Amino acid sequence: QWQAHVMLFELLIASEYWLAFHSDCSTWSDPSDGSEKHVHHVLPGLDIMLLDDSGGAAVDGDRGEVLLRGPTVFPGYVNADDGRIGTGPLNEAAFCNIRGQRFYRTRDRMMRVAGGFVYLGRVDSLSKRGGAWVDLDALEAAVLAVAGVMSAAVLCED
């Protein structure tokens, strides 16, 4: 009965960091193809950096991996060896220290534009399908392992 009185929205809540951005529904027009992309804004109290492909800080208009730190960013993964949060090899890969501050490496690529940031995809080979992460490189390797397959390419399409 209550559903007749409420509008439901599909809402993605991730434990790592997506409680870090909001959108006011403004868009940015990509000059390369004319597509409209939503502009995202960082919530107050969070620090963001964009790391370019060479590992340096991306400047305005450059694309880069999103690095975040702040109160809504999780403290780390549970280490399977000792049960502690934030230790072990998985955390070493997921976090980096810059100027004495610990940042989460989101593996998402964004670009700073006037008024905020636009999402441009991933910096790795992960893609979401049906709410589950799929490693496109691993999928391609599995296809190549099939007898008779000479070449393969797995692509992600929005």
Image (cartoon, helix red, strand yellow):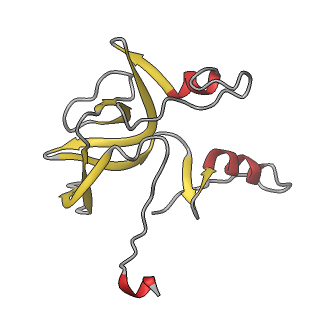
Residue 4 position (above or below residue 120)? below
Residue 98, given in percent of the width and then of the height, sits at 36, 16
Which residue, as the protein is rendered here, is positioned at the far top?
100
What residue is shown at x 33% (from left), y 12% (from top)? 99
Q: Is 143 displayed left or right of 132 in the figure?
A: right
In the image, 30 versus 57, the foreground residue is 57
Residue 23 position (above or below residue 135)? below
Which residue, as the protein is rendered here, is positioned at the far front?
1
What residue is shown at x 60% (from left), y 20% (from top)? 87
What residue is shown at x 53% (from left), y 30% (from top)? 76
In the image, 121 versus 101, the foreground residue is 101
Determine the image quadrant of residue 11. Answer: bottom left
Which residue, as the protein is rendered here, is positioned at the far right?
147
In the image, 26 versus 123, the foreground residue is 26
What residue is shown at x 37% (from left), y 80% (from top)? 6
Residue 23, given in percent of the width and then of the height, sits at 25, 56
How many numbered callouts?
0
Q: Quadrant of the C terminus?
A: bottom left
Residue 154 position (above or below residue 52)? below
Residue 47, given in percent of the width and then of the height, sits at 28, 30
Which residue, as the protein is rendered here, is positioned at the far left?
114
Q: Is 79 displayed left or right of 148 in the figure?
A: left
Determine the image quadrant of residue 72. Answer: top left
Residue 90, given in percent of the width and then of the height, sits at 62, 27
